Amino acid sequence: MRILNIGMYNRHEGQESMRIALEGISSYYEEYSFPERPRQAWEAFATAHGNFDVIFLHVQAPNVIPLATAKLLHSLGVKIYNFTGDVRQPLPKWYIDLAPYVTTLFTNMHDVNTLRSMGFDAHYFQVGYNEHYYNNDVVAAKNVASIVFMGNNYGKTFPLGDFRKDLVATLTRKYRNDFAVYGCGWGGNTQNINNNQTLEGQIYRGCKIAINLSHFNLSRYSSDRLFRILGCEAFCLSHKYLDIDMEFEDGKDLVTWSSLAELVHNIDKYLPLEEERRQIAKQGNITCTTNFTWTVRMNQLKELWEAVALS
């Protein structure tokens, strides 16, 4: 399988695990970034027929992929997979316009079902995480707060934006220096480590409790924050998003919460229980490394392509 990988990633966020996983299923592989090498990316896409069997797109903005070219490649038998790890609600029109010529891969079932209801090909395809930075061999950072949350504050831009702000305010008041938030938009002396994956992994290794809360509550959706936490073998208190139990066992892989009162209760319960936290974190790491690496994900991509190629 000859693969062309075109994405929106840039030099600030390493993609080693994704690249290695794609190369692992490829007989020939090329990669281009629209932000870094736009002209080369366009040319590779436009001339893909005869050079590649599969195009793996990671495009999350309009006016990047020319519909006419996508339509032509589709008619010539080049299989295009358009993957997004993020969520935009309502589903942007350009996704729908591109849908007839690609297989769209979403990290939540809501968008999968939306496109399927229109008669288009869409699949649930959860995000992976970069094992080079998030693993249980990472050296733990020193002097880390016991409880950490990593996420940005975009205000009311996303459905759970206010909930996220309330979470940070509540935990800051109650736990003070035992709680730390990392990301942009929080003000004060908050450290933004969005482009520092090395430090992020070290902090997860050094904390006692890591909190997961995404901006959306959609079926099976979490940002890769969850997999970074579990990949580092940190004890995770995760928001109980819709259908989380399809992939994780509450109390075994992680512990869930639905309200801030329940979150505080769980923090107070588990903070002194070091051995119980360790056992849950260990099992969560096993589940994560078994099911949510990019290697697992790209083998799923290979299976999707082979099912079409052999039909």
Image: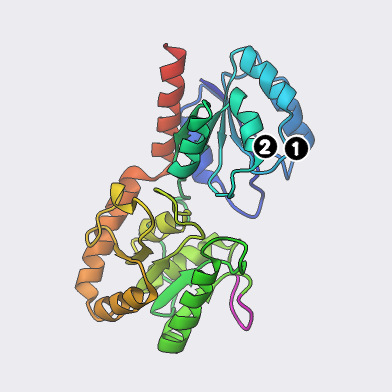
Q: CA distance from mark 1 to mark 2?
A: 8 Å
Residue displayed at 40% across by 68% down:
211
Residue displayed at 66% across by 31% down:
97
Task: Identify the secondary structure beneath mark 2.
Answer: helix
187 inside magenta stretch:
yes
Would you place residue 63 above or below residue 239 in this image?
above
Would you place residue 286 above or below residue 298 in this image?
below
Residue 6 seen in the figure: no
Callout 2, which amino acid?
Answer: Trp
Q: Position of residue 246 (x, y in %)?
A: 30, 47
Q: Nearer the viewer, mark 1 or mark 2?
A: 2
Which residue occupies the extreme right position in the image? 39
Task: Identify the secondary structure beneath mark 1.
Answer: loop
Crowding at dot 1, Cα within 10 Å, few <14 / some 14-19 / many 20+, comes out as few
Q: Position of residue 234 (x, y in %)?
A: 35, 65
Callout 1, which amino acid?
Answer: Asn
Q: Provide the residue span drawn in magenta.
A: 186-192
Q: Please, what is the dominant secondary structure of the magenta stretch?
A: loop
Q: Taking 82 as reference, is 267 left or right?
A: left
- Do tag 1 and tag 2 residues touch (Cβ < 8 Å)? yes
Q: Which residue is denoted by mark 2 in the rendering?
A: 94
Q: Which residue is denoted by mark 1 in the rendering?
A: 63
Q: Quadrant of residue 102?
A: top right
Would you place residue 139 above or below residue 93 in this image?
below
Residue displayed at 39% across by 69% down:
210
Crowding at dot 2, Cα within 10 Å, few <14 / some 14-19 / many 20+, comes out as some
If the image is split into quadrants, where does the C terminus sit? top left
57 inside magenta stretch:
no
